[in-house]
Amino acid sequence: MRRLTLLAFTALTAASLSGCPDYKKMAAEQLAAEGYEGAELTAGTGAGTSYGFTATKDGRPCEGTIAVTAMPGSSAADFSTDVRCKVPERDKPEQAPDDPFAAQAAACEKGDLKACTDLGRALVEGSVGQRDLERARAVHVKACEAGAMPSCNALGTLHLRGLGGPQDEAQAEVLFTKSCDAADMDGCALLGRLRFINRRGKEARELLKRACDAGSFIGCDGLGAAYREAVGGDEDMAEAKRLFQMACDGGEASGCGNLGTMYLRGEGGVKSDARAKELLERACKGGVTSACAEHKRIP
């Protein structure tokens, strides 16, 4: 089962929160920790915790989005970033390279829905020179309408984060619901995460449990976050740790990051900086940018 990591649930901020979190401040601090300088944030639409931003990193102008999830009174925040940094003229190739996704595009045109989903994912997750978010949306639209639920999930994530087009939380919910109703458990997990963001805790936990029980490691990671943050039920740090371990073992990088944070704080058992560093490095290599920043903070 392919994993989607665009909406990672990583709890990687140790700030103690009370009342309504200052999402913009938390987003700015996270960007600074990841090495972005002079970040200017503008609020997005939807749940009110997504921001567009411009900044510089290593002397290069960058732009992107950062989404913040934090429950009132929580001691943790979840960050999801997408950044595009301009390639200096001197570093650009003199001639445009061949399309690295030509074979997938050809298969997609012939009706191979898996190839379409893989192409759409590659256009989002590829290197700076290979990414094309607008094209990714178009590819996922075609595949989703033809019945490929993984593309519906990916398209919903693009809508939720405002990538490749306008941010549209309502459309994301429609797409996740479509996938979940079709018994795609990753779709149910993503819908559960959206309920988590929108403070609909009981529904979130039910959807995430259903997904995890059916084998979705995205669901197990999200359910672990619900137990850790007491969303939709009681707090249970030991159960959260078990679920994050399950997600991490299943290849969900966000689960490794969450588990690493628990070891770093000593939540749910023993505190171990060495184990935390190992897990956060694994999450970082899996594309969880906030895990990279947290990993660097450990001596």
Image (cartoon, grey):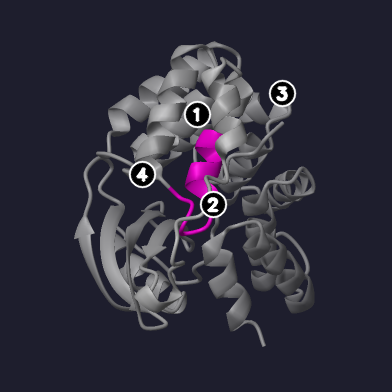
Q: Can residue 130 be spotted in the picture? A: yes
- In percent of width and height, residue 56 lies at 33, 77
Image: 56 above or below 106: below
Queried whether the magenta region covers residue 280, the answer comes back as: no
CA gap between label 2 and label 4 equals 17 Å
The residue tagged 4 is: 161
Disc on the earlier residue, 4 or 3 = 4
For disc 3, the neighbor class at 10 Å (few under 14, some 14 to 19, many from 20) is some
Disc on the earlier residue, 3 or 2 = 2
Residue at the image position 28 percent from the left and 42 percent from the top? 47
Camera-nearest label, 2 or 4: 2
- In percent of width and height, residue 63 lies at 31, 63
Query: What's drawn in magenta, residue-wise?
Result: 118-131
Queried whether the magenta region covers residue 130, the answer comes back as: yes
Residue at the image position 64 percent from the left and 27 percent from the top? 211
The residue tagged 3 is: 214
Disc on the earlier residue, 1 or 3 = 1
- In percent of width and height, residue 65 lies at 34, 56
Q: Which mark is residue 39?
A: none
CA gap between label 1 and label 3 equals 17 Å
- In percent of width and height, residue 79 lies at 45, 58
Residue in front for this viewpoint, 17 or 290:
290
Q: Which mark is residue 126?
A: 2
The residue tagged 1 is: 153
Instruction: Locate residue 216 relative to residue 235 in the image: left or right.
Output: right
Three-letter code for the amino acid on which mark 1 is drawn: Asn
CA gap between label 1 and label 2 equals 18 Å
Three-letter code for the amino acid on which mark 4 is drawn: Arg
CA gap between label 3 and label 2 equals 30 Å
For disc 1, the neighbor class at 10 Å (few under 14, some 14 to 19, many from 20) is many
